[in-house]
Image: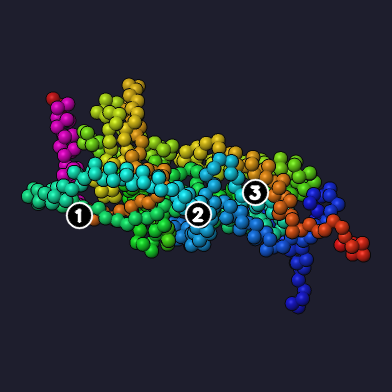
């Protein structure tokens, strides 16, 4: 696979352990006390979306459901709230993946923004339907930050898959 | 014969179709959403998941608490000295009342015995440290470091040095979740100290509280202190809850809108005292007799009305 489909650079295959590691780190980042600051993105949504686009056969709705359950318990939210949103996010991301990877990375970020906004909006509407208060517009700043972070996240998460630029001409791959 | 199979060999096995999977997961998550919200019967699932999540969460909280610790350490002598002075001053200020408290309690108990009134319940409990605020932006909850292992049960009230903070709503093996009194629609039965009027105060979700269902001409003033009325068998009587800060009397509505601010440091971090559950109330009087009386009376009244109408 390439960084984008139009690129001629071929990547190494991804290691499942690396996917697991990044999702765990995202979970830890979500549990940090910084979560209350305005504009802090939902790290899990970002990483999950990334892997669902990249490796939709490895990371899919099953992972999304489990991570959602963990987040629900950790947040003290109603069970199923994050599950629902993350499952939809994973589905949306994996069905977008064929189209998304043709674009340069900055435009990919633009494509991801509605998905992440939808994740947040679903959670807000699920809770508001059941009688909670509107959490304020600061709640919807996170997805914008996350979609900007899509650009560094792409490089960071693909880092172990890049191969050296100067290659041995005797071994093309 | 075993080798003959009509299905294609699993070269490109991809599992169920994405749409089928999506439907399945969405149905499951909606089902647990509704069950958790309406029937509250998924506590076992929540506790099991919490067993795995809790250690990770504590690890994630460590950097923050280390920073806090360092700041406290570096705050220096001057601040501590000042705080110490203030505390000593406060202690001296409350001394006249506190010194006589023991004697007053004894006197109160003797008088209650004379009057044949039930003994006042003693407040006791255990101190718990607030670990962190729950991340859910839709509610106001905190997590404390004592749980089932310390004998905490759901429903126990929590107070700090100034007043009521909240109520334990969920218990995990090593931690418990306290819903603050400012959480939306969290209700505390209260009494206005000045007039003795009983009511219920509700959290609004924005850090304020509202005293609902009091008539527009109710005798409430800005600055009135609300204390727990003790009528709910959850909170003991007399803990400060809120202070009235704003009253809107609009004659278009039959109720006054009375807003209060919590007295306890509800949004602060620190330690809370989780009070033990109250002693169970004495058994209710036999139901059959009471029901008979209550059904008889309206019947009699109706008959009277009818006779007056006929006349």
Chain letter for mark 3: A
Residue A9, compared with residue B300, is above or below; it is below
Percent x, y of residue B218: 26, 28
Label 1 or label 2, whichever comes before in sequence order:
2
Q: Quadrant of the N terminus of chain A?
A: bottom right
Of circles 1 and 2, the one toward us is 2
Work out how far the residue at label 3 is from the one at label 2, CA to CA, in angstroms.
28 Å
Q: Residues within 10 Å of mark 1 (few under 14, many from 20)?
A: few
Q: Quadrant of residue A105?
A: top right
Position of residue B6 relative to residue A132, above or below, is below
Could you confirm whether marks 1 and 2 are on the same chain? yes
Query: Is residue B153 rendered to the left or right of residue A65?
Result: left
Q: Which residue is mark 2?
A: B66
**Is there CB contact under 8 Å for labels 1 and 3?**
no
Q: CB of mark 1 within 8 Å of CB of mark 2?
A: no
Residue A89, position as x, y percentages in the image: 64, 48
Q: Which secondary structure, mark 2?
A: helix
Q: How is the image coloured?
A: rainbow
Q: CA distance from mark 1 to mark 2?
A: 51 Å
Q: Residues within 10 Å of mark 3 (few under 14, many from 20)?
A: many
Q: Is residue B299 magenta?
A: yes
Q: Which residues are magenta?
A: B283-309
Residue under circle 3?
A46
**Residue depicted at 65% across the width and 52% down the height:** A48
Looking at the image, which residue is at 41% across and 43% down? B267
- Residue B232 seen from this side: no
Main structural element of the magenta stretch: helix, strand or loop?
A: helix
Circle 3 sits in a helix, a strand or a loop, which is it?
helix
Kindly indicate whether the residue at mark 2 contacts the one at mark 3 (C-beta within 8 angstroms). no
Circle 1 residue = B283
Q: Chain of mark 1?
A: B
Tell me, yes or no, whether dots 3 and 2 are on the same chain.
Answer: no
């Amino acid at each position: 696979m390439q960084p984008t489909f139009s690129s001629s650079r071929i990547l190494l295959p991804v290691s499942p352990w690396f996917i697991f590691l990044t999702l765990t780190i995202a979970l830890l980042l979500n549990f940090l006390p910084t979560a209350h600051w305005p504009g802090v993105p939902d790290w899990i949504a970002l990483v999950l979306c990334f892997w669902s686009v990249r490796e939709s056969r490895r990371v899919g709705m099953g992972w999304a459901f489990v991570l959602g359950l963990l987040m629900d318990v950790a947040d003290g939210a109603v069970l199923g709230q994050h599950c629902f949103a993350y499952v939809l996010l994973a589905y949306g991301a994996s069905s977008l993946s064929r189209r998304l990877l043709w674009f340069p990375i900055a435009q990919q970020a633009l494509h991801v923004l509605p998905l992440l906004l939808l994740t947040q909006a679903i959670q807000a509407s699920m809770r508001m339907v059941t009688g909670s208060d509107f959490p304020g517009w600061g709640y919807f700043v996170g997805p914008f930050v996350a979609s900007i972070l899509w650009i560094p996240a792409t490089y960071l998460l693909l880092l172990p898959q890049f191969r050296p630029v100067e290659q041995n001409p005797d071994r093309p791959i | 014969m075993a080798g003959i199979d009509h299905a294609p060999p699993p070269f490109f096995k991809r599992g169920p179709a994405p749409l089928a999977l999506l439907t399945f997961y969405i149905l499951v998550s909606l089902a647990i959403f509704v069950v958790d919200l309406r029937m509250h019967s998924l506590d076992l699932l929540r506790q099991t998941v919490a067993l795995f999540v809790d250690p990770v969460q504590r690890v994630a909280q460590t950097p923050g608490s280390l920073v806090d610790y360092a700041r406290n350490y570096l705050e220096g002598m001057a601040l501590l000295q000042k705080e110490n002075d203030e505390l000593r001053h406060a202690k001296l200020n409350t001394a006249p009342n506190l010194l006589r408290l023991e004697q007053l309690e004894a006197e109160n108990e003797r008088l209650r015995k004379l009057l044949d009134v039930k003994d006042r319940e003693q407040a006791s409990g255990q101190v718990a440290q607030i670990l962190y605020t729950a991340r859910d932006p839709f509610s106001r909850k905190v997590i404390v470091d004592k749980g089932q292992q310390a004998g905490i049960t759901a429903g126990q009230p929590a107070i700090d040095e100034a007043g009521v903070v909240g109520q334990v709503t969920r218990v995990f093996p090593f931690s418990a979740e306290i819903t603050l009194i400012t959480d939306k629609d969290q209700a505390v039965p209260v009494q206005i100290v000045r007039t003795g009027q009983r009511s219920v105060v509700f959290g609004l979700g924005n850090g304020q509280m509202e005293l609902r269902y009091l008539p527009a001409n109710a005798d409430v003033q800005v600055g009135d202190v609300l204390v727990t009325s003790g009528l709910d068998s959850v909170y003991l009587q007399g803990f400060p809850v809120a202070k009235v800060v704003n009253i809107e009397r609009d004659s278009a509505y039959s109720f006054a809108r009375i807003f209060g601010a919590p007295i306890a440091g509800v949004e602060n971090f620190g330690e809370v005292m989780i009070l033990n559950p109250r002693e169970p109330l004495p058994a209710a009087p036999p139901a059959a007799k009471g029901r008979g009386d209550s059904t008889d009376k309206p019947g009699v009244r109706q008959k009277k009305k009818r006779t007056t109408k006929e006349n």
